[in-house]
Amino acid sequence: MENLPFSVLILSSIVKILFIAHLLIIGVMAMIWAERRVSGWMQDRLGPNRVGFQGILQPIADGIKFLFKEDLIPDHVDKPLYVLAPAMVLIPALVTIAVVPFGSSITVLGHEISLQVADINIGILYILAITSLGVYGVVLGAWASNNKYSLLGGLRSSAQMISYELTLGLAIIGVLMLTSSLHLRAIAEAQGAYPWHWNFLIHFPAFLAFTTAMFAETNRLPFDLAEAEQELVAGYHTEYSSMKFAMFFMAEYMHMIVGSAVTVTLFLGGWHFFGLENIGGPVWSGVISFGIFFVKTAIFLFVFIWVRWTLPRFRYDQLMNFGWKFLLPVTLTSIVVTGTLWIITGSRLVVGIGNAVAGFIVVSIVAGLLVMDAPKPAMQDSDNRLTPTALDAIE
Amino acid sequence: MNAEQILFILFGAVSLIGAVAVISFRHPIYSALSLVVTFFAQAGLFLLLGAHFVAAVQVIVYAGAIMVLFLFVIMLLNLGTLSVKGAIGGKLKGFAIILGILLAIEGIYIATNVLNNTAIASAQPATAAPNTTTYDIGELLFSKYLLPFEVTSLILLAALIGVIVLVKRSSNDSI
């Protein structure tokens, strides 16, 4: 990779950027179709199946509809920020993919080209940095709309994102400690070919915490309080219509795709799968490794949809309690246990078992404390009136 | 002029424009956003110096966390447009003028020194040379600068506990 001639480097970079950016956008369209069809399947109905084979062209029809709708800018909004906000949501989602390695490497005309746009030595930190910027678009869009439901949605979303970013960052530390590198490629390569070598088994509690935090960061159910339609109309994008709304919509799906790709890289072995990625020469092995990565990401994306129709939405205090009192202790314990056991034994097996046991113990303790600490049904409210519970007790 | 210099001028210019915009905008939200732009340009400058880790931390901590909290507070308080008269009127005016003159002198002094002194100009590449990967920073933090590092974390912990004690209402209030 380092030894490529300058012209090859530039050309291959351009091809890779075009490829991955377009793949991401096509991925968004595929996700929108998949979400509607899978939702339909889970609810025992059909979903869109008229446009093209099995409705596969439905996202294109949707896109055309969005483009031809009137681009409405309400009178009472703060115009510069209102226009800027959708782009500020979309761009962080789009640029994060730059550091994700989507395959091993491919040899074209004697040059070995790694399947990754940029292998920078702060890979993980870059992802965390860009992810933390995604909140700006949401907050600014909410504020610029000059609408109380929008603002409430934006505030909820930003508080939630800040709370769960902490877990997101801390959950990665264990992985970094064992790999001793911030390069995403190095992290993916350090995990062997077989599933029992992958990080999700070694850092099981951290993996669960990371995945949960990922759901929160993407504003997906069960964490979609920012756009809880029963309470806030549509949350931060209530005032948006036409393509601007579509950009918010696309950004959510892009976040999901990129998040899944990052999770696959960090925890699910990247492009490795039982050594399948090594067969078939220097060209085909690269293609196969990309295929493996693609399938893993797609499976993870299916989980996103699956969870959406399985879990009900959290209440806001539950959301905050879950983030701060549950996920944070779990990830912190995971860091301490990983570090200690790694220094003492140097065995991944021991670290994995220790992490699982420690995670179980912490979850039990925290759950016990939460149950003990839970407020009993109040007999009187703040104005000394009897509450419904108290009335029940009297009757 | 090579690519690095062009990028330096670009980031420097954006950083300065952002900084001026922070104090020029009437609305606090726009000021806060201008500050974010400045932080970004500074992260770019750090990247040019080869300090990748510092650049990432700059974005994560300042642009990602602190400024979001700023925005949060501005929105919750729903601060309106500030009038210039109210902001720098009265007693603060003299103070502001004195500080401004001092800063200007300082800036001119530094600018003339750097421009005239070829020693500083030629020394710059040498200061950028040391390895600044995360590995090196981690090793330095946990060997040479272990005590300051631990003291800093203790101070932060104390601040954290202090905030919780101050903010937490006594349990009698909630019933």
Image: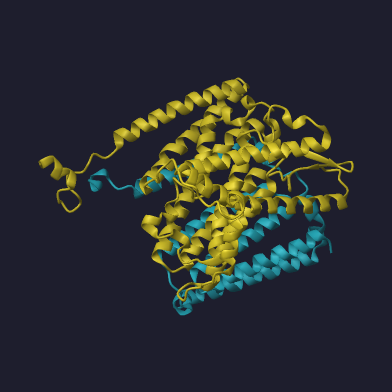
Chain colours: A yellow, B cyan
Residue A154 left/right relative to A203: left
Residue at horizontal 76 percent and vertical 45 percent from the top: B130
Foreground: A313 or B130? A313
* Residue A25 in picture, x, y percent from top left: 65, 54
Residue A336, relative to residue A68: is it above or below? above
Residue A173, relative to residue B62: is it above or below? above
Foreground: A23 or A176? A23
Where, quadrant-wise, is the N terminus of chain B in this rendering?
Answer: bottom right
* Residue A353 in picture, x, y percent from top left: 54, 22
Residue A187, relative to residue B16: is it above or below? above
Q: Residue furthest left?
A: A395
* Residue A242 in picture, x, y percent from top left: 54, 66
* Residue A198 in picture, x, y percent from top left: 63, 29
- Can you see residue B34? no
Residue A274 left/right relative to A157: right
Count of number-bearing discs: 0
Residue A106 left/right relative to B73: right
- Can you see residue A261? yes
Q: Residue furthest bottom?
A: B85
Residue at horizontal 41 percent and vertical 54 percent from the top: A228
Where, quadrant-wise, is the C terminus of chain B in this rendering?
Answer: top left
Residue at horizontal 56 percent and vertical 26 percent from the top: A340
